[in-house]
Image: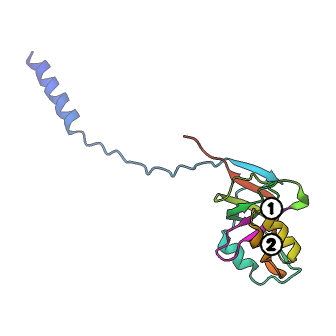
Amino acid sequence: MKKIIFLFAISFAIIGCKNEKTEELPMEAEETAINYQSFGNEITDENVLTTTEMMEKSQNLKPGDTIDVKFAATVKDVCQKKGCWMNIETGAEPVMVRFKDYAFFMPKDIAGQEIIVNGKAYVEEMSVDDQRHYAEDGGKTPEEIAAITEPKLSLAFEADGVLIPEVQNN
């Protein structure tokens, strides 16, 4: 009996004194896959410039120049008749985005959303008639539309593909 008690005591001592190091591995950053609604040509969310980087690349454009670029931006407003154009925030003046060959349209309720656009940035001179047309489509008042009296030189964008993040319901 003494031997049994002695064996239990030694077993407990060995188990209690066991100094086993357990190394905690750092948690790997979880990659959250973002699902997108895709419009136009198929594009990816890789190698996307920020709005600031895109504006820096386009600052020296002159009428007739174009640059191919893919960047992320926030939608300011969308054509409320068809979704056939949108304005995006740039930190300065919003940039008018139209869609290549009038081949696709945007949902009309995406103002304020971050999106990814791919296509060509260019400088254009927009006529008074075109400015008034877009102002009307955008829901401007008759007074605001009548106040447009001169052509405007501005940065524009022709998108061939757009990604809009899908809303995740958890």
> Count of labels shown?
2
Whether residue 119 appears in this view of the structure is: no
Quarter the N terminus occupies: top left
Residue range (magenta) = 87-99
Residue denoted by label 1: 137
Q: Quadrant of residue 51?
A: bottom right
**Horizontal relation, residue 33 to residue 136: left or right:** left
Identify the residue at the far front of this view: 143
Question: Does the magenta run of residues contain 89?
Answer: yes
- Is 48 rendered above or below residue 34? below
Identify the residue at the far right of this view: 101
Q: Where's residue 129, x and y in %?
A: 88, 73
Question: Does the magenta run of residues contain 153?
Answer: no
Q: Who's the residue at 42% across and 49% down the image? A: 25
Secondary structure, mark 1, is helix
Q: Quick one: label 2 or label 1, which is nearer the N terminus?
A: 1
Residue placed most toward the observer, 86 or 117 = 86
Whether residue 18 appears in this view of the structure is: yes
Q: Quadrant of residue 155?
A: bottom right
- Is 150 rendered above or below residue 106? below
Amino acid at pointer 2: Ala
Q: CA distance from mark 2 to mark 1?
A: 17 Å
Q: Who's the residue at 83% across and 71% down the image? A: 132
Quarter the C terminus occupies: top right
Q: Where's residue 22, x and y in %?
A: 34, 44
Residue denoted by label 2: 156
Mark 2: few/some/many CA within 10 Å (<14, 14-19, 20+)? many
